[in-house]
Amino acid sequence: DWKAQFRPMINVDVPGESLNFGFRSMLLIEQFFGTQGSAKTHFGGHLGLNLGLGSEQSVVGFELNDSLSRTPTFFQELGQGLAGDELNLLQWRNKGLANLILRPGGGALEFRLGYGNDLGFYDSAPTSERHMINFEAKLRFLPKTALVFGGDLSFFSSQTRAQFPASPNKGTPLALTLGLQGQITTRMTATARVGYGDSLVWAGDFFSTAALSNVRTFITNLRVGFAFTPSSELSLGYDRTVRPVIVNDAYISDAINARVQWGIMGGRLTLGAYG
């Protein structure tokens, strides 16, 4: 069948020197045209919140990001390429990340240490949960360019395995990356990070015997962006990740994505296209 997605959005940003706040809302309308059946319309949506405490020069800072989504029949995060198979299932999903930020020595060195939580409430599958420990270190060697190390370890499990034969094994996905990110010219930015990803799927409890479904591979995050104006830009990217999944335990995702954003009326109205 052919389908179209319409995503009207309202975003509110309140910038500040030591306190900034943002709110995002989106209605997702998915229209099937009925080329292989009857025409149908499905609705989903997305609410997001971000909070930041401290400026870029603060020795100590804090950031919080949280999002709540409802899938219609298929959902993916904007600009992130195709989503995993489990996101084809109807669900509510909440994803949050809180980071403590430390900038000793004047800000050239920056650390982020945080906790993330990802909950999936499926209509016809077990509830999944993922608790993540997040660490990131940045060393700025140019005004707007930094060497970046990132690492995260998470605990993924299903709450109702006995009620769903295809329920996943427990896993502790691990991701380690190293690379560069920053501004190449006044209009061009780039990110190049490579590393190691391991789903660490266990046949029994956490840290028991590795399951046959365990996968490991190199991972990467490559992105380049060009700003035509302060509110208009083009970005291209490629991401390779290892993710836990509610069906078949884990998978390797390769995603190419593109994003075009164009601001009009002095940036007060922004039009965008994603793929």
Image (cartoon, rainbow, N blue to C red):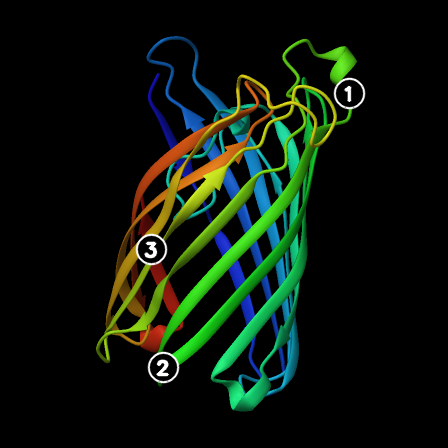
The structure residue drawn at horizontal position 49% and vertical position 26%, both measured from the top left corner, is 41
Q: Nearer the viewer, residue 245 or 150?
A: 150
Residue to which mark 1 is pinned: 160
Q: Secondary structure at mark 3?
A: strand
Expressed as whole percent of the image width and height from the top left, the position of residue 100 reads 67, 70
Task: Give the residue type at disc 2.
Answer: Phe
Q: Quadrant of the C terminus?
A: top left
Q: Quadrant of the N terminus?
A: top left
Task: Give the residue type at disc 1.
Answer: Thr
User: In the displayed structure, would residue 185 be above or below residue 261?
Assistant: below
Task: Give the residue type at disc 3.
Answer: Gly
User: In the displayed structure, would residue 186 be above or below residue 210?
Assistant: below
Residue to which mark 2 is pinned: 141
Residue 76 visible within the image? no
**Label 3 crowding class (10 Å Cα cut-off): few <14, some 14-19, many 20+?**
few
**Label 1 crowding class (10 Å Cα cut-off): few <14, some 14-19, many 20+?**
few
Q: Secondary structure at mark 1?
A: loop
**Which label is found at residue 272?**
3
